Image (cartoon, rainbow, N blue to C red):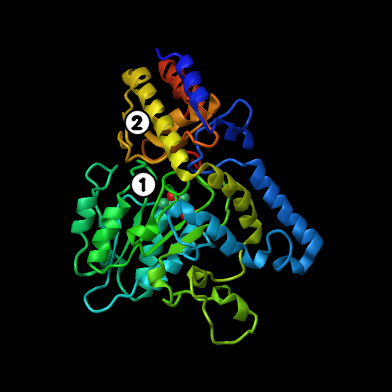
Amino acid sequence: MFKIEEAIKLDAQDEISQYKNEFYLMKDVLYMDGNSLGLLSKRAETTLLNLLDSWKTLGIDGWTEGENPWFYMSETVGGKMAPLVGGKLGEVIATGSTTSNLHQLVATFYKPTGNKTKILADELNFPSDIYALKSQIALKGLDPAEHLVQVESDDGRFLSEDRIIEAMTEDIALIVLPGVLYRSGQVLNMEKIAAAANDRGIPIGFDLCHSIGSVPHSLHEWGVDFAFWCTYKHLNGGPGSVGGLFVHEKNFGTAPGLAGWFGSKKESQFDMNHTMDPAEDSSAFQVGTPHVLSLAPVIGALEMFDEVGIDRIREKSLKLTGYMMKLVEHELSEFGFTVGNPIDDTRGGHILLEHQEAARICKALKEAGVIPDFRAPNGVRLAPVALYNTFEDVWHTIQKLKVIMDEKRYEKFENKRGVVA
Ligand SMILES: *Cc1c(COP(=O)(O)O)cnc(C)c1O
């Protein structure tokens, strides 16, 4: 058995361990679900409460006055997210949600012409992305069954970059792929894929929901055309917090597919003309009034990423998941788990354990005070998060899982998922 002393030693060596004190950790709970919904931090709470206060004390003047004037908040928060995606100032804006931003970006960059009419995606992406792509194809009067190409996976876990590149044929008008796969946690080689797309003149965009705040990106340098993400997973912005998008500087001036007055130049927005004067940077891709209340907690949440830096977060995250995999290998080998995430450093911020009884193992984990999430049909996802989880948390999680398997404690539950996870 691996002793807890090793975990205690690893925690003592951890240079960013103090950040867990910034978060509201639930009593007697081992939270391993920060890749689905990050926890509330005191700083996020403060910026949300301050926002309410600005409404209370300033009324409509809150748009232009106070600590965080609402009129400029999307741009300000976008600027704070830029280092996390490797974007230049002006390339990133906080707006919308993952799915609504995807709609905006496809409406902007998908221009089927002649024989070049198809969208290239993959068969492992999150369902909402696929629904959005199919509906955008249908809006162009085309048949999604014919015009959405989904690169296949051999094992249902991973995608091959070479196979993706082979699929970039003459008939592809647009490419949309995930940065990190939500089930297996595979980090796609975005640089290599983007370079191949650029060579072929095909616009390419990435969904960064599972990669932002977890792995570093260099979107500008890689020549990625656009990207989009949510802020409620690794960024800890809170349920339904405002998402973000990136549009590469080379694409500035492209007319937004879905236009609205908040995409205007700030100085002329209130001229109220019927001819839009779009902003010259990624601001142009906003639609309506920003969801200020859902943006406020993101300001506080991002401060910690700024202080720690994504490289140190990634370094600790790899150590946490590496330690977890080591414990799984040695402590759980007799119980029929398969590790479904990449073993090497192409794994993202979570690990995936596959097991026939996964749904009810997750229920037994919850009963034991561990929060995992279940991904159909057979996945237990566990995300030890760099900012608030410890090596000791990882050790206790695997010990609890071992007891559940040893004593078959999952058998008293039905092997069916709950409504959300
Ligand atoms: C979480 C997630 C979404 C969710 O989209 P919303 O519009 O925020 O509900 C979409 N795509 C991926 C890959 C995700 O991980």
The x, y position of residue 158, in whole percent, is 28, 44
**Which quarter of the rendered picture does the N terminus lie within?**
top left
Q: Earlier in the sequence, mark 2 or mark 1?
A: 1
CA gap between label 2 and label 1 equals 21 Å
Dot 1 corresponds to which residue? Answer: 181
Callout 1 amino acid: Leu
Dot 2 corresponds to which residue? Answer: 356
Pointers 2 and 1 in contact (CB under 8 A)?
no
The x, y position of residue 320, in whole percent, is 43, 30
The x, y position of residue 243, in whole percent, is 52, 57
Callout 2 amino acid: Gln
> Toward which corner of the image does residue 53 lie, by quadrant?
bottom right
Residue at the far right: name it: 57
* Residue 298 drawn above or below residue 34: below
Dot 2 crowding, Cα within 10 Å, few <14, some 14–19, many 20+: some
Q: Is residue 165 left or right of residue 38?
A: left
**SS at mark 2 in the image:** loop
Q: Is residue 46 left or right of residue 38?
A: right
* Residue 350 drawn above or below residue 209: above
The x, y position of residue 224, in whole percent, is 35, 61
Q: Is residue 95 left or right of residue 318?
A: right
Residue sitting at 46 percent across and 60 percent down?
A: 99
Q: Residue 287 versus residue 224: which sits nearer the camera?
A: 224
